[in-house]
Every structure is written in structure tokens, then in C-alpha cells.
Image (spheres, rainbow, N blue to C red):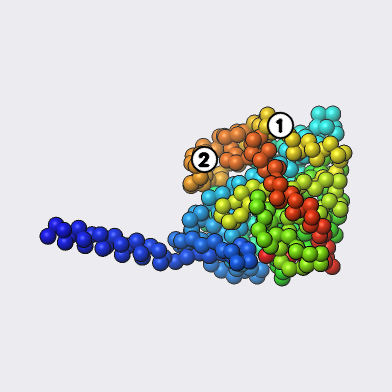
Amino acid sequence: MASSDAKADNDQSVILKERAKSAFRYTEDIAPGCRIDMTLHAILHSSVSDFQEVQVIESYFGRTLVTDGKTQSAEHDEFVYHESLVHPPLFWSAILSGRNNDGGDGGPKRVFIGGGGELATAREVLRHNTVERLVMVDIDPAVIEVCKKYLPEWGGDAVANHPKMELIIGDAHKYLMETDENFDVIIMDISDPIEAGPGIALYTQEFYNRAADVLSKENGIFVTQAGSANYVPAPHSFPKEEGDNSESTCFSPIMNTLATVFDHAVPYSVPMPSFGEDWGFVMAFNGPDVDAAGLIDLSPATIDALVEERIETVSGVPEHRFRSIGINRATTGRERGGDVLKHYDGKAHRGMFTLSKMLRGGMKSDKRIMTEENPIFMF
């Protein structure tokens, strides 16, 4: 009898195991012929705004914002993306301010964000105690409201209603084309340049020329997310021959285009598990040649000192349920400096700006430039 009971228990275990395999799945195409697949635990929200489909799901990577079938940020690693996008340009603006103004006037004070509907980019900007004014322009109010409700750890009402923050629902391209204001740092946290997508105009030479005019002359920095930037580039990453306009990655064309407008266009990248690939960014600024090398070779001690001096927590933003090793901790709301950031510090900076030999080689061979007449689309 005992043997029969043991067999029944074992059969039930096998049944449960097989049922688990057939659970609802979340899949996402990340490259031609390549997709990621994981268990879908829950769909917390699903709607269609005037601009895109908006979903919040619970998956292997925790709570995740998905728009038009593409992961935008996930609880597991959103801080890696947003800290990487924000802190290198703001600290470099501070350093340039110090060089050009006999010790500087406190570093970047006026910051513009194009896009950023999750509010996490704004969260990171507001952690800099030198910032006095932050303007964020996002075209889709539905994304902002959904994120405030379901993803408050990204920033939520505490960021949206921050006294330094001006949140504008509108077209970031139109705003920058028409503004009379100057900014120390412009951050573009926008949709990828995909065909028929709304973001393509924000990746063109024409737009970058206007952004350069809007930046402060002494310490102005432009930074944009730049799509896939794999350490080992995927087969579709670069055109196979001159004139090949098939969908590819846009990391090198974005860098090339910014280099036609600014003295320096410096690429960097970080691994993003929830995206299924490494992700790229490009910083652009003006100045002597030594500045580009100076940014890449900043000593860990210099960056760590800036973090300790300038970074403060944003009151009212709840803590993540982190699952990544080494960061499973909650904050009290009183942290300063390195205790606030989960990813970015002096050692991480060095790694971010060290691209692989294969990626550098592919980018060097890719001469494409993005214009209004000749856009380039990402897969």
C-alpha cells in the first residue's frame, strides 16, 4: 500500500511539473529569427492609447512595462538602464562646468528629458542635488498614468509632482524646436527608431542640430538611448553592403549622426537581461579632443567622489522588490551617495565605456547617417 501511495504522489508531481511547462507564456522578438520566451505570471494592465498598446505584466523579470509588444523596462534591471542613461552625462557636465568656469557653478542645473514616461529617468535626474529645473515632455499621458499606478517604484507621483519637475504632455520634437530655453543636459529616453513609429524624427541629423543650439555652450551634454549594442554583434547588426537599407541595429548610425553635429560622440553600453541583449547609449558634446578620452578614462575615485557629493534619494519613491544578487535591500529614504544607486559607480563606468573589439570593428565599418530624407530603422 505504501508503494502505491508513493507512486501516486510521484505521478501527481509529474503532472504538476508538466502543467507548469504549459503555463501562459510571454514571448518577444528581439532580432530576426530570435525571440525570448518566459512564463507570464499575470497581466496587470492592458489598453490601447492614442499612440500605442500599453501593458504591464508580471514575468520572470518582475513587473514589466510593454508597449507595442516591446519591453520598455522591468523591475529586475530598470535601474541599470536609467542610471546608465542619466548619471554619466550629468557628472560629465559637472566636470566640464568646473573646467570652464574656474571651479564651476555647481554643475548641471537645467535638464530636459524627451520621453521618459515611466518617470524613472526623471527619478535619476532628481537625485542630483545641483538640479534646479527639470522639464520632461512625453507624448502619451496613458503611459505616465499606468506607470504611476502599477510601477510607483519607477518614480510615480513623488516624481511627477516634484517641485523641481515640469511635466508636459506633448511632442518633445516640437518642444525643442520652439523653446527659447537653454539646458545643460538633454536626455532622450524615447521609443526605438522603428518603421511607422513616432520616434524616428528624434534620431535625425536635423533634430540633433537643433538640440545643439538649445544646449548650454560651456557644459552642454546630449545623450540618447541607442538600441541594441551586443558585445558579440548579431548577424543583422550592420549592413552587408553599402546601400543596404534592411532593418538592423542603429547604435553606430546614431553615433555617426551625432558626430556630424558635435565635436565628440561617445558610445557606451550595459547588459540588459530583460531586453535579451546589451543596450547602447551615445553621449555627445563639444570641446577639445582631450575631453573624449577624459570621459572614458575618468578615474573610479573621481566618479565615486561625485556620487557621494551630489546624489540624494528622492523622497516618497517606494523601494523595488529587487531580485538581483547584491542589491536585495530596502532604502529608508535618508540615503545619500553610493547607498542610493544600485548600479552606477566608478568601476561600473569603466566597464560601460569599454566596447568589445568586435563591436568597435563593426561600428567603424558602418558609415550610415540618419536624416529626415534617409531614415534608418531598427528591427
Measuring from the top left, give residue 158's x and y in whole percent. 59, 48
Q: Quadrant of residue 173?
A: bottom right
Using the image as rendered, state which of residue 327 and residue 28 is in the foreground: 28
Measuring from the top left, give residue 230's x and y in whole percent. 65, 53
Q: Which residue is mark 2?
A: 327
The answer to whether 239 is drawn above or below residue 123 in the figure is below
Q: Amino acid at mark 2?
A: Ile
Helix, strand or loop at disc 1? Answer: loop
Q: Is residue 119 left or right of residue 326?
A: right
Q: Amino acid at mark 1?
A: Ser
Q: Which mark is residue 132?
A: none
Q: Is residue 348 left or right of residue 1?
A: right
Q: Residue at x 79, y 38 (%)?
A: 293
Measuring from the top left, give residue 91's x and y in whole percent. 73, 38
First along the sequence among labels 2 and 1: 1
Q: Residue at x 66, y 45 (%)?
A: 84
Using the image as rendered, state which of residue 152 and residue 91 is in the foreground: 91
Q: Can residue 146 be seen here?
A: no
Task: Single out the mark in the foreground, 2 or 1.
Answer: 1
Q: Can residue 102 be seen here?
A: yes
Q: Quadrant of the C terminus?
A: bottom right
Q: Is residue 214 left or right of residue 128?
A: right
Measuring from the top left, give residue 186's x and y in whole percent. 76, 49
Marks 2 and 1, how far apart at CA: 24 Å
The answer to whether 376 is drawn above or below residue 180 in the figure is below
The answer to whether 193 is drawn above or below residue 84 in the figure is below
Helix, strand or loop at disc 2? Answer: loop
Q: Which mark is residue 299?
A: 1
Give neighbour class at mark 2: few <14, some 14-19, many 20+ (Cα, 10 Å): few
